[in-house]
Structures are given as C-alpha cells and as structure tokens.
Amino acid sequence: MVTRKVEHIQTAHPSSDGDGVKIRRVHGFNNAKFSPYLMIDELKSENPDDYIGGFPPHPHRGIETLTYMLKGHFQHKDHMGNVGELRSGGAQWMSAGKGVIHSEMPIMDQGELHGFQIWINLPADEKKKPAQYHDFQPDVIVEKQLSDISTLRVISGDLTIEGDTLSGPLQQTGVPTTIADWRAKASTKVNACINPEHQALIFVYQGEISINSTSIKEGQLALLSAGEGLEMKSLGPAGALLLTGIPIDEPVVHYGPFVMNTMEEIEQAIQDYQNGVLTD
C-alpha cells in the first residue's frame, strides 16, 4: 500500500464575504491538485459583530456547497422554499446546478461560532441540472470513537478507518467525495485507507498534526500525494478536516458566485441573474 505524503501546504488568509462576515479562506480554483474542491471558508468568532450581517440573498451556478458547523447554528433559505437551521455538529449540502438563490445566517451557540463552508466543483453536465438541498442534523452524522482521546465523524462518502468502513449520510453528489472530521484530545495517531482514485486534502482547524513527518499547523491546508494509505498524527489536541474526491478534468472559470467552464457561460449566468431567469 502506497502511503500518501504532503506535496504542498497552503495557509488560509483572512477575508470577508456576504455582509462583511469575517472568515479565513483557502482556495484552489486554478490548481488541478485541489479538484474537485474549490475553496474552504472557516467561520470562527466569539464576537457577533464579525458575522451579524450574514449572507443576504445571493445567486450561485455550477457548484455544490457543504456547510459544516462544529459550534453554532446556520440558517438557510432558498428560492425553492427550503428552510433549514443546523445545530452544532450538523451539515447542509446544496447543489446549485443551473441556478439557486439563497441566504445564510450564522448564529452563535453558547457564545461560540465555528464552522466551514466548502465549495465543490460540478462536472459540466451537472452544472445544467436543477438545484437541490438537504440538511443533516448532528444525530445522522456517522461518528466512531477511535479511542478515549480520538473521534472521527464522516459527513460525505465512505472512509475506511482502523479496518472499519464508515459511510456518511451524504452520498448522492455531483462528483464522488469523502469529507470527514478527525478530532483528538491529545497526541495520538490514526490510519485510514483512501480510494486511490481520489485526490486528498487536509485542513487543520485546531492544533497541529503531522503526515509522514511533515507538520501541518492550524489554519493550513495540505495537498497530498497519490496513494491509498494515510497515517495522521496529532501533536497534542487537534482537529482536522479530511477531504477527498474524484478530480474533474475540465476548465474552471470563476467569477464571484459562479463557476463554469468558459467565460461565455459566466457571462450567460450573469445575464440570466440580471434578467431574473437564473433558476428557470
């Protein structure tokens, strides 16, 4: 079994989105090693002023989003009539397809807010399909206690960990993905088996971990080499998101909330939104 190694590390940078919501962002729109993922936004604050404006109604076309909350609530409303509110530990999945208009509002839980929104690209044929939405409250997220100090939660796809295959509640997506959350209370290690056809990324949101002696610190994302085996070590208390998926070998053209394959398609999306027919 070929064990994956760290090929490149990116550090998330402070940014803002929506109505001034403060985030920490790492993206790879033009990096084939990132595919099928496009961007990870981390929301983390104890100050309501950092996010009180939320994300007012806005459009998307050509992507999926997965929102995962460690702590706090997240309200979603869209043009299809979907209304969802995550609790701490839950996730929301939305496929924009040919067009969606939605709003999002983060809400503290016991004075804390910490979560992520992950953008996932769609293959060209999936960009033409109707929008979809599902939410997954914390009780349906698959969780395995690996030891007294280590826990794994699987949100999307399948992951073999310590010999057991865990299947997350989100299975039907535009491109096969696996998204999992590994948490450790102290120094420990865990072994996973990843589909060798998937590319793999790890984002550390707490503490520090190492992969094949390469350290990845809080706020950093590691792009991993090809392989099937993965050994992660936590260097004290730590938390990390593992994201894998089948890469999409297609051009990526990104403009604001739209991700398509050509500039002409971007211009069409803008025109459709301005004319009120984006979701038709």
Image: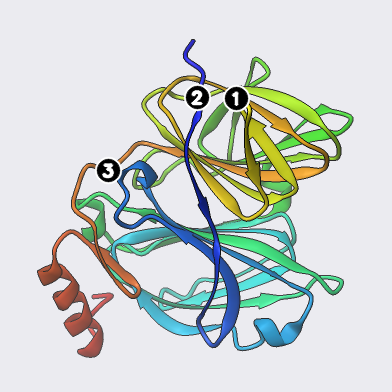
Q: What element carries label 1?
A: loop
Q: Separation of disc 1 and disc 3 at Cα? A: 27 Å
Q: Is mark 3 on a helix, strand or loop?
A: loop
User: The residue under label 1 is which amino acid type?
Assistant: Asn
32 left or right, relative to 238? left
105 left or right, relative to 59? right
Quadrant of residue 264 within the rendered picture: bottom left
Q: Which of marks 1 and 2 is in front?
A: 1
Q: Position of residue 226 (x, y in %)?
A: 40, 25
Q: What residue is shown with label 3? A: 248
Nearest the viewer among 97 and 145 is 145
Return the mark for residue 4.
2
User: The residue under label 3 is which amino acid type?
Assistant: Ile
Return the mark for residue 80.
none
- Label 2 packing within 10 angstroms: few (<14), some (14-19), many (20+): many
Q: Separation of disc 2 and disc 3 at Cα? A: 20 Å
- Label 3 packing within 10 angstroms: few (<14), some (14-19), many (20+): some
Quadrant of residue 268 within the rendered picture: bottom left
- Check if mark 1's residue and mark 2's residue have beta carbons within 8 Å: yes
Name the outermost residue toward the right. 148
Q: Quadrant of the C terminus?
A: bottom left
Q: Residue at x 71, y 88 (%)?
A: 49
- Check if mark 1's residue and mark 3's residue have beta carbons within 8 Å: no
114 left or right, relative to 67? right
Name the outermost residue toward the left. 264
